[in-house]
Amino acid sequence: MSAQLTVVGIGTEGWDGLGAAARAAVEAATLIVGSERQLALLPETPAVRRRWPSPIEGLVEELVSGAAGPACILASGDPMLHGIGATLARRVAPERLTVHPHLSAFSLACARLGWAAADTDLLSAVSSRPEVVARLLQPGRRMVVYVAGRDGASDVAEILRKRGFGPSRFVVLEQLGGPDEQVIESTAEEWGTQPADPLHALAIECRASAEAAVLPGSPGLPDDAYEHDGQLTKHEVRAITMAALAPLPGQLLWDVGAGSGSIAIEWLRAEPTARAIAVEARLERAERVARNASTLGVPQLEVRCGEAPAALEALEQPDAIFIGGGLGAANLVAHCWRELRPGGRVVANAVTLQGELVLHAASATYGGRVTRIEISRAEPLGRYTAWRAQLPVVQWAASKERA
């Protein structure tokens, strides 16, 4: 068996806050890995001590491969809650990993504020970018946000202000659980750009200003939520398309011919653990997709600029595929179907007769259903109101049989 890894959660109170099993693991270790601050919390032991480098990936690989040997790894609070324990657990067999958790900053924050943990969302602006908070900006929602560095609070406050949530209750929790703990009440507007203690978390109770664009968590966001040049799946069709794609935990979507990126973005908003790659041929549109993803709280969206199907080569095999553009490209549907995982879903939309013919041919070859979606909106006609039909959309949706 490869080298054993033991992860010990440690709080700001240091050694005094560790249980007997956690202390024994530290005392028995021959190698201890942690940040400079964490290592300074320990008493003297015979172990070799290694500080995390920046970036940490090289040392993580040493630990995972066993090249570093048996190791005790220090983590802040609960290592399995946006911590190194969760990172290692995704890459090593369970029998190689022992975890001694500590109280998390999330639990401590909820306790200090009297918030029910089950009704409070947890986000990490450490493993992702601060824009991740935008996905959950809805009045009345409570969230705890993990941040890093002195500017963590000000970076998040700026995002709230820009999106019309400056009145939100904004609580900065410094040195949680330690002798120097401070809980500072503010609002996102009032906090401004002031620095915080390097070790802090945020608690936010969302309050919208009168001009805020309040967006739901459900699919079919308003069209004006997106920056676009007209290449946008309209919100009614988008909601139908998302229902057909059916986002599931951990699954990967290819959004081919992404346009403004709305399908990939709403896939990620619907299922936070899912992943997505948006493929767009035009550079200015690809850049727009990235901006929309950041604005709408899913900065993790991967954007590739290139022509499909060539741009799809070497991508990770997807669980779902949406084809919103480029249906005229030779072999695009065949390539997508071949790469789709067994049990996966493919959905394609067309508004031209030529695209519709491609979808009927795909249905004849691979099965599935073809649906015609027609939307009319009531609009002014002189002094009266009349129905104005939108371009009909033909949709092909199919599932690939499991192996």
Image: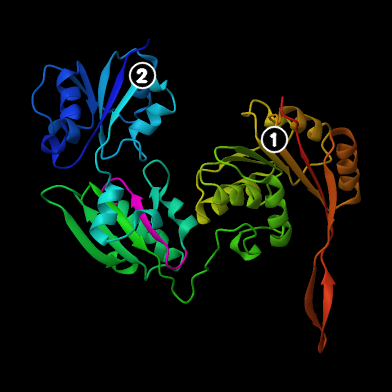
Residue furthest to the top in view is 1
Viewer-closest of 133 and 397: 397
In the image, residue 273 sits, relative to residue 309, either above or below, namely: below
Assign the N terminus to one quadrant of the image. top left
Amino acid type for the residue under numbered disc 1: Gly
Q: Which residue is mark 1?
A: 344
Viewer-closest of 333 and 245: 245
Residue 63 placement (x, y as % from top left) = 34, 19
Relative to residue 173, is residue 274 drawn left or right?
right
The question of residue 149 being in magenta is answered with yes
In the image, residue 135 sits, relative to residue 379, either above or below, namely: above
Write down the quadrant of residue 234 in the picture.
Answer: bottom right
Secondary structure, magenta segment, majority class: loop
Viewer-closest of 127 and 149: 127
- Residue located 32% across and 31% down the image: 54
Write down the quadrant of residue 16 in the picture.
Answer: top left
* Mark linked to residue 96: 2
Per the image, label 1 sits on a secondary structure element best described as loop
Q: Which residues are magenta?
A: 138-151
